Amino acid sequence: MNINTCNTGNTGVAEAPASAAEPQVFIPAADIYEKPESVLIRCDLPGVRDEDVEITLHNKVLSVSANQRPQSREGHAAISSEYLTGRYQRTFNLNRDLDDAEIKARLRNGVLEIELPKAREAQPRRINITN
C-alpha cells in the first residue's frame, strides 16, 4: 500500500493567520499502519469534538479537517492564555485498492482513527497449484 501525505513538512502550524480574526491552521501529527486487509491512519486532534471533524474522500484524496473551539471556564476570566485554537487540516493521497464504501472513523481521547479496508482483489492471497 502506498499512501502519500500532503502538507506534511513538520507537523504543527501550517500557516499563520492573515489577521487575528482568522483561525490558526495546524497540521496534525499522523501515524499510518498497514496490515494485509486494511490501513489505519491515526491523527492527533486534541480539544476537538466529533461534530467538529470533517473527513472527505474525493478522487482518492482523503482530507481531514477539524475546528478546535476555544476552551473557557464559565464564570472565569482568562489571566493568561497559551493554548492555541484554530483549524486542523491534513490530506492523504490514496492508491486505488481500497474499499471506499467500508471506510470507518472514530475519535477518542483526542486521537482520530480512520480505518481504510483494502479492496478484496488487493488483499494478499495464496494461489494453489493444481494438476
Image (cartoon, rainbow, N blue to C red):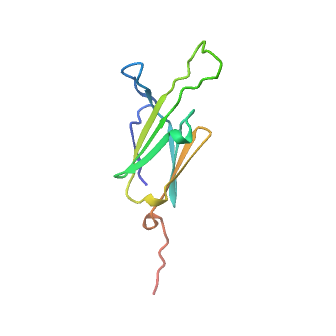
**Residue 38: horizontal and vertical position, in percent?**
51, 57
Which residue extends farthest left? 59
Which residue extends farthest bottom? 131
**Residue 7: horizontal and vertical position, in percent?**
39, 36
Q: Is residue 33 above or below residue 19?
A: below
Please tell me how many numbered marks the rendered image carries.
Answer: 0
Q: Is residue 84 above or below residue 47?
A: above
Q: Quadrant of the C terminus?
A: bottom left
The residue lying at 43 percent from left, 67 percent from top is: 121
The residue lying at 46 percent from left, 43 percent from top is: 54
- Occupied quadrant, residue 21: top left
The residue lying at 46 percent from left, 32 percent from top is: 87
Q: Is residue 47 left or right of residue 122?
A: right
Which residue extends farthest top? 79
Q: Nearer the viewer, residue 44 or 81?
A: 81
Q: Quadrant of the N terminus?
A: bottom left
**Residue 83: horizontal and vertical position, in percent?**
56, 22
Which residue extends farthest front? 75
